[in-house]
Amino acid sequence: MFDYREALKNIPHKPGVYQYWDESNTLIYIGKAKDLRNRVSSYFVKDQGLNAKTRVLVSKIRNITFTIVDTEVDAWLLENSLIKKHKPKYNIDLKDDKTYPWIVIKKENFPRIYWTRNVIRDGSKYLGPYPSVSMMHTIIGVIRETYALRTCNLALTPENINAGKFKVCLEYQLGNCKGPCQNYQTQEDYDRSIIEIQDILSGKIGNVVKGLKTDMELAAVNLDFEQAHKLKRKYDLLEKYQHKSTVVNTSITDIDVFSIASEEKYAFVNYLKVMNGTITQTQTLELKKRLDESDEELLTLAISEFRTRYNSQSKEIIVPFDIELDDEKIRFTVPKMGEKKKLLDLSEKNVHFFKRDKMEQYEKLNPDVRTERLLTQMMKDLRMNQLPKHIECFDNSNFQGKYPVSAIVVFRDAKPSKRDYRYFNVKTVEGPNDFATMEEAVYRRYRRMLDEGGTLPQLVIIDGGKGQLSAALKSLKLLGIEKQLTVIGIAKRLEELFYPGDQYPMYLDKRSETLKIIQQLRDEAHRFGITAHRKKRDKGTLATELELIPGVGRLSAEKLLKYFKSVKKIREAKLEELQEVLNLKQSQAVLNYFKEEAVDGEE
């Protein structure tokens, strides 16, 4: 049975296209969404009022895949091209082959500019497609209002014009055309307007917007509010308009786009096929590393696999880095800007999401995969030469210099090992001296570990800045083990990491998993240290109260607390029970003390 709840966890709140597959791995439905997770989840909500056919569709879903894009418009265009290509059973059959409109700059003398749904490879320049027809008409309207262009379909060759075959029409009389048909406008002057219009259609609409704003303000000054309103509407549409989209103009006729994301044992390669400015194929391939293959080797292998699988004959391949592959029929491009770079960014966005999704799945099935990945990442981030399988963290606690405690917490394989937690009652330090306390704790910890033949940790974390780190390093040097492990200090305020002998701290990304584990160690050491400190402080307070009893000193008070666990039980103890710890005289003194206390309480 298909677990849609588990599938939904891996779908992001991003625009894109989703695909439903049945038990035979056949694509049965393609849809678009502004928010992929919300849209897909709506199919599985009870009492949603789904029709019978949709309920049948949902009952057949066994797998969900998706492609994320930058905008809802991109999702719309991508959905259109994928439905036409795959014709899934449960999608609307686009029998009329309706396509989105384009703006064409016709290849001819004195080029016409108009919109069309049919792209003809005749050398003309096509811009689009435009999913919003009203916006497309607005752009054409702005162009025609800004520039005087011909709208007729006359063959304006030099021979015909010079022969006087044409006469100016009403458009010339209205000022909408400069009359090239009668040589009233030169080809050079007309072409300058075409170049400016191409810039506008390529997204460089600043000059047009500026002109519209000026005309709008002038109309308002002249109290022509109707005209001002029309110009304001066009101005607003242009401001919202974003011509550059995932689906680029048709100058990109046939290219392949590849990107790669690697892990320690896996690599993932995304492939986008772009035909006539539209994405027609998209897939991500997983590769399991056998040796220490480079990204270039893996990407080269994947390129060959994808091009064979889809029978691609594209002569240009967009890649994230240079590929050393000798093939005269193929040109590799590493774009730095422009529409090709935008396509590469989209491919990389998809491959990184796919990688994260897959790794999360693997880690759920096999926690060891996550552990190894975390430890490997920590080793790289902290510049270590071995995996930090065993980590220890030190933290000191005291109250105005009294009851000092140094706590040690232990993580094994990036998880707390609470049975290995320890704390030290500081013996050699008088008064509040955090550095000396740290020095004593580190020395005692590893002196004992060496004496007992224990295995040293790969990483030691000191909660504190340079001072605490220097104190810890002093003890490690005294023991001769400073080169056998990595020791770092972490300062709370800015989460700075200090290394011995390094003047400047290192900063990890706040979202880094390495930093999160270090913070967890630090917080756990602080918690454990505070707990031990409070126990010691409470015990010290109670012992001080028992010392008020005549004949009972510090040592005897501690023996009583250790045996009876609390003052309440000591108060309730009989003479014979007290004699298990104290002599007869002391026991009688304790008994008398609490009897007098009870009488005083009654009064």
Image (cartoon, rainbow, N blue to C red):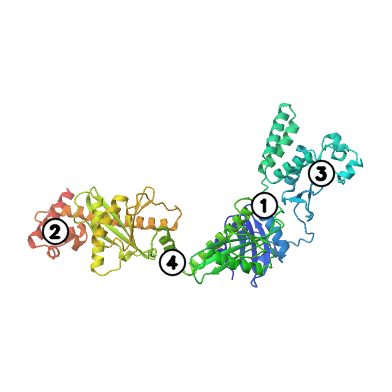
For badge 4, the amino acid type reads Glu
Kindly indicate the quadrant of the structure image that contains residue 257: bottom right
Q: CA distance from mark 1 to mark 4?
A: 41 Å
The residue furthest top is: 222
Regarding mark 4 in the picture, which secondary structure is present there?
helix
What residue appears at the point 47 percent right and 69 percent down from the top-left corner? 366
Dots 1 and 3: beta carbons under 8 Å? no
Q: Nearer the viewer, mark 1 or mark 4?
A: 4
User: Crowding near pointer 2: few (<14 within 10 Å), some, many (20+)?
Assistant: few
Mark seen at residue 280: none
Residue picked out by circle 2: 555
For badge 2, the amino acid type reads Leu
The percent coordinates of residue 8 (x first, y second) are 57, 61
Mark seen at residue 110: 3
Residue picked out by circle 4: 372
Q: Sequence order check: which comes first, mark 2 or mark 4?
A: 4
Q: Sequence order check: which comes first, mark 3 or mark 4?
A: 3
Q: CA distance from mark 1 to mark 3?
A: 33 Å
What residue appears at the point 25 percent right and 67 percent down from the top-left corner? 450
* Near-viewer residue (321 or 576): 321
The percent coordinates of residue 287 (x first, y second) are 55, 68
Residue picked out by circle 1: 73
Q: Is residue 596 left or right of residue 186?
A: left
Q: Sequence order check: which comes first, mark 1 or mark 2?
A: 1
Q: CA distance from mark 1 to mark 2?
A: 80 Å
* Near-viewer residue (593 or 563): 563
The percent coordinates of residue 591 (x first, y second) are 12, 58
Regarding mark 2 in the picture, which secondary structure is present there?
helix
Q: Nearer the viewer, mark 2 or mark 3?
A: 3
Q: CA distance from mark 3 to mark 4?
A: 67 Å
